[in-house]
Image (cartoon, rainbow, N blue to C red):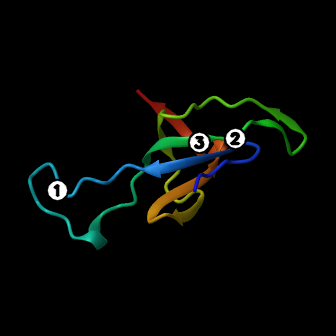
Amino acid sequence: MTIKPLADRVVLKLVEAEETTKSGIILAGSAKEKPQVAEVIAVGPGGIVDGKDVDMYVETGDRVLTSKYSGTEVKIDDVEYTIVRQSDILAIVE
């Protein structure tokens, strides 16, 4: 099954968080923070959203930095994705 986002929405797959700290301490699952870096899986067409013209600046394959608790989480074929508005993306990571 594929996901095709509408309007200014973007489908992201979160990059796994580090399991050890810089000093070598292994973190338990509950101690890990939600990752903020994600890979763009699909991008909506943009267009007129809420009466304003929206251009899409991200592309499939980009790595982006997102707001910590933004978007809607969905699980499809045992893979977790987050769907966010382009405005919830803070930066493209290069």
Q: Position of residue 30 (x, y in %)?
A: 30, 73
Give the mark nearest the N terminus, 1 or 2: 1
* Rendering quarter of residue 8: top right
Give the mark nearest the N terminus, 3 or 1: 1
Q: Position of residue 93 (x, y in %)?
A: 43, 32
Quadrant that contains the N terminus: bottom right
| Marks 2 and 3, how far apart at CA | 7 Å
Q: Residue at x 65, y 41 (%)?
A: 86
* Residue 92 or residue 2, whichever sits in front: 2
* Rendering quarter of residue 31: bottom left
Q: Residue furthest left?
A: 24
Residue under numbered circle 1: 20
The amino acid type, in three-letter code, at marker 2 is: Gly
The amino acid type, in three-letter code, at marker 3 is: Ala
Left/right placement of residue 28 relative to residue 53 reads left
* Residue 86 or residue 62, whichever sits in front: 62
Q: Residue at x 52, y 48 (%)?
A: 12
Residue under numbered circle 2: 44
Q: Position of residue 52 (x, y in %)?
A: 86, 36
Residue under numbered circle 3: 42
Q: Is 79 rendered above or below residue 54? A: below
| Marks 3 and 1, how far apart at CA | 30 Å
